[in-house]
Image: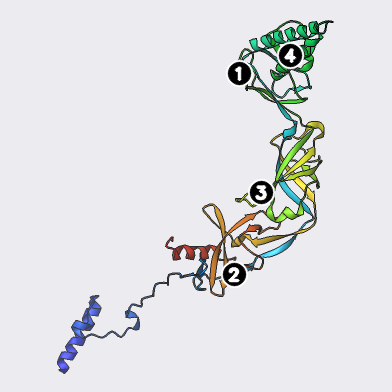
């Protein structure tokens, strides 16, 4: 036995020197090296989701999976006594008017082009139409009849003749003729000048000489810029700070040194559900006609101070088309909340429009790692 054991030991030593692997089970060799056995590391546990009775999902947090994670608080801050909002200049629709063809015919002459300034009552476009000629002939006939009916001895028909004259005049007015032009008719004429209904600027021109027209065709659109509207958006949280009749100032990048004065004329009755904003309509004086439609403007409204909710920008995670934050609900679990935000004047923070509440504790440093764990727990990793 001693000889066999000695032989086995010599065989093991020879095999080791020769670089061969010898299985101890077959040769009886024993290894004296403690590191020869492989140590297996258990795979990391899959993040767990806890389903609450109210339908909310909580993600269990393992500090080892998110090293260096820190938390921050959603806080309320004071708003300044000046509310600012971005808006856009538009025409006051009460100061916009169109010249519409009320007859079938063609355009004979045009006297103005787009962006020209016109005076009220100025001849704009000449229309040719047999309808004008027929209506003018009826008017002249009714006028003559009324004149003859006023002669002594036939006064009984004077009332009827006057009514016919009024009806013929009304017909010409409905065709677009001005009262002064109607009274000046001396003979039927198929061509009639359409006049500007208001003084202002030609903002749309669809009239082309020789073009055929039908009733309802818009030939010109005129607008005045003495007073304009600025339509701006304010957040739902600021609604209580504004009211109709409130004074405001407007500034533009085009004229940074000019301040335009105005008032809030209307507050929209509804809220945009996607932006959580309401529109305010501001009537603003426009000296020098500097404010142009579609121009961007910034509105400043002097009001009482308010409150705003802010969150560290680092706590926000963008996914598809929305921002999310992870709110600590228990010491070891967080909930994913959709957050609507807007810009804020303090660097590193965003203003919260919806989705978070004052005092909420959110993941700040490590929010992206927590988001990865959320995806992994939902099989999206």
Q: Report the residue marked by disc 3.
A: 270
Q: Which label's residue is closer to the chain start, 2 or 3?
A: 2
Q: Nearer the viewer, mark 4 or mark 2?
A: 4
Q: Nearer the viewer, residue 232 or 268?
A: 268
Distance from the alpha carbon under mark 4 to that under mark 3: 51 Å
For label 2, the residue is: 70
User: Real-space Cα distance between discs 4 and 2?
Assistant: 89 Å
Reply above or below: 6 against 143.
below
Q: Residue furthest bottom?
A: 2
- Label 1, on which residue? 214
Which label sits in the foreground, 1 or 4?
Answer: 4
On screen, 98 above or below 70?
above
Labels 4, 3: front one: 4
Q: Secondary structure at mark 2?
A: loop
Specify the farthest residue to the right.
152
Residue 114 lies, in percent from the top left, at 69, 23
Pick the front one: 260 or 355? 355
Image depth: mark 1 or mark 2 in front = 1
Looking at the image, is mark 1 or mark 2 earlier in the sequence?
A: 2
Viewer can see residue 124: no
Q: Residues within 10 Å of mark 1 (few under 14, many from 20)?
A: few
Quadrant of residue 198 within the rendered picture:
top right
Q: CA distance from mark 1 to mark 3?
A: 39 Å
Q: Secondary structure at mark 1?
A: loop
Label 4: element kind: helix
Quadrant assignment, res 88 = top right
Is tag 4's residue or tag 3's residue first in the polypeptide sequence?
A: 4
Q: Residue at x 77, y 40 (%)?
A: 283
Q: CA distance from mark 1 to mark 4?
A: 27 Å
Reading the image, the residue beneath label 4 is: 164
């Amino acid at each position: 036995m001693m000889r066999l054991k000695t032989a086995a030991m010599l065989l093991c030593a020879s095999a080791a020197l020769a670089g061969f692997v010898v299985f101890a089970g077959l040769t009886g060799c024993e290894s004296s090296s403690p590191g020869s056995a492989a140590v297996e590391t258990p795979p990391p546990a899959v993040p767990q989701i806890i389903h609450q009775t109210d339908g909310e999902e909580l993600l269990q947090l393992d500090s080892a999976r998110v090293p260096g994670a820190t938390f921050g608080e959603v806080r309320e801050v004071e708003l300044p006594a000046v509310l600012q909002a971005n808006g856009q200049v538009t025409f006051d629709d009460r100061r916009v008017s169109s010249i519409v063809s009320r007859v079938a015919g063609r355009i004979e002459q045009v006297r103005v082009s787009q962006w020209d300034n016109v005076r009220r009552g100025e001849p704009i476009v000449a229309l040719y139409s047999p309808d004008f000629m027929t209506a003018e002939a009826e008017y002249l006939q009714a006028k003559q009849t009324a004149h003859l009916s006023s002669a002594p001895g036939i006064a009984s028909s004077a009332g009827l003749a006057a009514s016919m004259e009024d009806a013929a005049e009304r017909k010409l007015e409905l065709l677009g003729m001005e009262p002064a032009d109607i009274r000046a008719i001396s003979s039927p004429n198929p061509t009639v000048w359409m006049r500007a209904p208001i003084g202002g600027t030609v903002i749309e021109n669809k009239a082309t000489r020789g073009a055929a027209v039908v009733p309802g065709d818009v030939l010109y659109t005129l607008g005045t810029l003495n007073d304009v509207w600025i339509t701006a958006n304010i957040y739902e949280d600021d609604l209580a700070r504004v009211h109709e009749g409130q004074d405001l100032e407007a500034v533009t990048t085009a004229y940074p040194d000019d301040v335009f004065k105005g008032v809030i004329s209307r507050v929209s009755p509804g809220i945009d559900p996607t932006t959580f904003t309401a529109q305010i309509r501001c009537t603003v004086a426009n000296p020098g006609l500097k404010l142009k439609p579609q121009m961007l403007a910034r509105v400043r409204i002097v009001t009482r101070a308010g409150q705003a909710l802010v969150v560290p920008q680092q706590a926000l995670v963008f996914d598809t088309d929305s921002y999310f934050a992870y709110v600590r609900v228990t010491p070891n679990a967080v909930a994913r909340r959709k957050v609507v935000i807007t810009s804020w004047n303090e660097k590193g923070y965003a203003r919260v429009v919806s989705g978070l509440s004052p005092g909420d504790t959110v993941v700040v440093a490590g929010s992206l790692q927590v988001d990865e764990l959320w995806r992994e727990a939902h099989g999206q990793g």
